[in-house]
Image: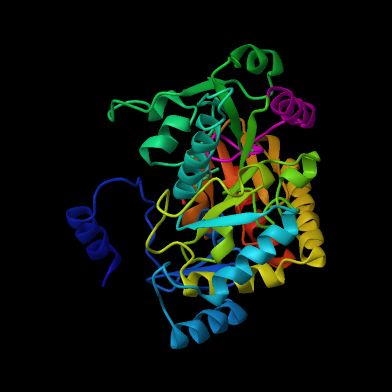
Amino acid sequence: MKKSEIIKRDKERIANTYARYEMVADKGRGAVCYDESGKRYIDFVSGIGVNSLGFCDDGWINAVTEQLKKLQHVSNLYYTEPQIKVAEILTARTGMEKVFFSNSGAEANEAAIKITRKYSNSQSENSRNEIITLKNSFHGRTMATITATGQDQYHSHFFPFLSGFSYCPPNDMDALRSAVSDETCAVMLELVQGEGGVVNLEEAFVKDVEALCQEKGMLLIVDEVQTGIGRTGKFFAYEHFGISPDLITFAKGVGGGLPIGGVILGKTVANVLEPGNHGTTYGGNPVACAGALEVLSRIDETFLAEVEKKGEYLKKALEKLPKVKSVSGMGLMLGVELEGETAKDAVEKALQNGLMLLTAKEKIRMLPPLVIEYQEIDEGLKILEDILK
Ligand SMILES: *Cc1c(COP(=O)(O)O)cnc(C)c1O
């Protein structure tokens, strides 16, 4: 089909939920994508931090297709090997106890919220169920997770929202301390707020939140859906902060492009869920898990050090570009604040010139595949430099 026809038919038959860019993606390899006309694009987005090994990685294709030829799905009422292996890797890397698998980030957070509430409601001497999240956060699109999301723009149309959530500005410990009541059972946060504009949380704030949670017997839930699985140069971003969350949610990058997510549970909450409390038909699907196993097997210390180095390289180069006011983020999750040009315009121009970028609030957001090569980073930087000058 021709581009114009695809766009016309999409507009007729696909629900109008995305402000799509004018590009029909057709195929890709590594950090390079091609549209339907064969035009080449450097990929600085990897979906939205999903294709961690880039497009169509050979090892990943092999792992996924071998599993496809064996068993594509069986109900979670039976045992499967790939699921156990993924859970063993995630618990070994975090020193935590158990995993619940979902298919997406929102469902991962939904599970974390349910587990937190079941645990906290069952504390006989101190039953409580309010969760504090941060303003400017993003936790997903289900009813519970848009309620958890601390942005007013999400809190319209779909009334009534859940009760039991309150919101505090990031990096403001006084506000958080005074928001805690006898009803508060948990604090939930992203360590670098992705959708909110690539906003880094301060280490002192994060450490103080952890200390407050310990003092008050509240759970600490860290949403690593975007920051996890090597994205920031550590396996999980919480390692940069020296904290030990009670629940960690993950999704986006873990499947290398297949839908899988979940929540990793520490000791306190490892055995909260019992048969019948929660579940999903597809969660931990063997094909998605085979993809995840390949991704996880590649992310060793050498790989993570490379992510960190490439992130530093990209950040330094971005800071030298015209109209760049500041660069936030960690590793290969970066936000670029511009002056004299809107991020939206820059991203559209970049796309026309063969570079895929995202926005996050007023910033350009970059989430390149973790395997991007220096030469591809340079190519992307050159395109961006040309449109900014
Ligand atoms: C993307 C994202 C989600 C939602 O993930 P979905 O897979 O789209 O449901 C939740 N939290 C964070 C931090 C995210 O970046």
- x, y (%) of residue 21? 39, 52
Q: Position of residue 338 (x, y in %)?
A: 61, 34
Q: Is residue 235 above or below residue 53?
A: above
**Is 225 included in the stretch rendered in magenta?**
no
Q: In the figure, is residue 58 to the left or right of 109? A: right
Is residue 198 highlighted in magenta? yes
Q: Is residue 114 left or right of residue 93?
A: left
Residue 46 in the image: above or below residue 75: above
Q: Residue at x 22, y 64 (%)?
A: 5
Q: Residue at x 66, y 56 (%)?
A: 382
Residue 189's image quarter?
Answer: top right
Q: How is the image coloured?
A: rainbow
What residue is at 45 percent from the left and 24 percent from the top? 164
Q: Is residue 202 above or below residue 88?
A: above
**Magenta stretch in the rendered image:** 191-216
- Which corner quadrant of the image does residue 365 belong to? top right
Residue at coordinates 70% horizontally, 18% vertically from top-left?
A: 173
Height in image: 318 above or below 91? above
x, y percent for residue 8: 21, 58
Viewer-proximal residue among 272 and 260? 272
Q: Nearer the viewer, residue 329 or 60?
A: 60
